[in-house]
């Protein structure tokens, strides 16, 4: 018999989701530095103390929002890159998947672009660092498989990421 969440569990999930959505809206509209936990909770119907039942601070909301989208995208990109038999499929497949994700949810990309300094600040502690590390690992794998020639992996990953970020910024604005 399938598991059915109880009322309390459903309520907790709904509260967490409300806080995340309010945080997303605040971060996109005002930017990370301009808002407080109080601003996030005011954007919900929840009591002010409820926030701390789910998150210790606004930074954890920001990271949770990033992780909610980036984990799936990183896994998808890794699968595409690892199955690519040539350089064209590696590059085209990864960019296509990334840009498709941006067009499906441009607000998420606006969230990242609006808060780039925060993303850079937590870069190595967040999913963005994991995404770039996964890209570097996939490039190393592609070199081993003969898809790419011997090349500086860190520079190539930075170039791929930078190009994708800037094209994504333009795509999200449309």
Image: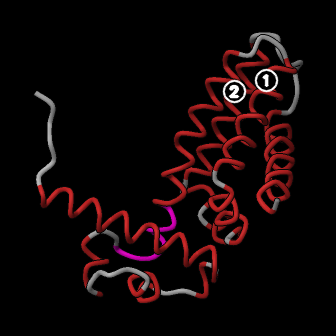
Q: Is residue 154 above or below residue 168?
A: above
Residue depth check, mark 1 versus mark 2: number of the one nearer the observer = 1
Q: Which mark is residue 76?
A: none
Q: Is residue 74 above or below residue 12?
A: above
Residues rendered magenta in the picture: 56-63
Q: Position of residue 72 (x, y in %)?
A: 53, 39
1 or 2: tag closer to the N-terminus: 1
Q: Residue at x 80, y 63 (%)?
A: 173
Q: Which mark is residue 90?
A: 1
> Could you tell me what secondary structure mostly forms the magenta stretch?
helix
Q: Position of residue 10 (x, y in %)?
A: 21, 57
Q: Position of residue 163 (x, y in %)?
A: 87, 47
Q: Which residue is mark 2?
A: 138
Q: Is residue 142 above or below residue 128?
A: above
Distance of mark 1 from mark 2, alpha carbons?
Answer: 9 Å
Q: Secondary structure at mark 2?
A: helix
Q: Secondary structure at mark 1?
A: helix
Q: Are marks 1 and 2 in contact (CB under 8 Å)?
A: yes
How packed mark 2 is, by other alpha carbons closer than 10 Å (few <14, some 14-19, many 20 or more), is many
**130 relative to 60 in the view: left or right:** right
Quarter occupied by the C terminus? bottom right
Is residue 62 covered in magenta? Answer: yes
Q: Residue at x 29, y 63 (%)?
A: 14
**1 relative to 82 in the view: left or right:** left
Q: How is the image coloured?
A: secondary structure
């Amino acid at each position: 018999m399938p598991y059915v969440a109880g009322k309390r569990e459903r309520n907790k999930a709904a509260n967490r989701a409300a806080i995340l959505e309010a945080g997303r809206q605040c971060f996109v509209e005002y930017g990370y530095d301009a808002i407080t936990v109080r601003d996030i909770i005011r954007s919900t119907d929840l009591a002010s103390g409820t926030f701390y039942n789910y998150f210790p601070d606004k930074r954890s909301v920001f990271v949770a929002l990033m992780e909610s989208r980036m984990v799936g995208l990183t896994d998808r990109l890794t699968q595409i890159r690892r199955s690519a038999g040539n350089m064209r499929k590696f590059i085209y497949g990864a960019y296509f998947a990334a840009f498709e994700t941006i067009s499906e949810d441009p607000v998420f990309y606006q969230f990242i672009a609006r808060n780039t300094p925060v993303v850079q600040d937590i870069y190595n502690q967040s999913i963005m660092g994991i995404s770039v590390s996964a890209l570097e690992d996939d490039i190393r794998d592609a070199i081993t498989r003969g898809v790419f020639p011997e090349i500086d992996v860190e520079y190539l990953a930075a170039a791929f990421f930078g190009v994708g970020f800037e094209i994504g910024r333009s795509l999200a604005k449309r």
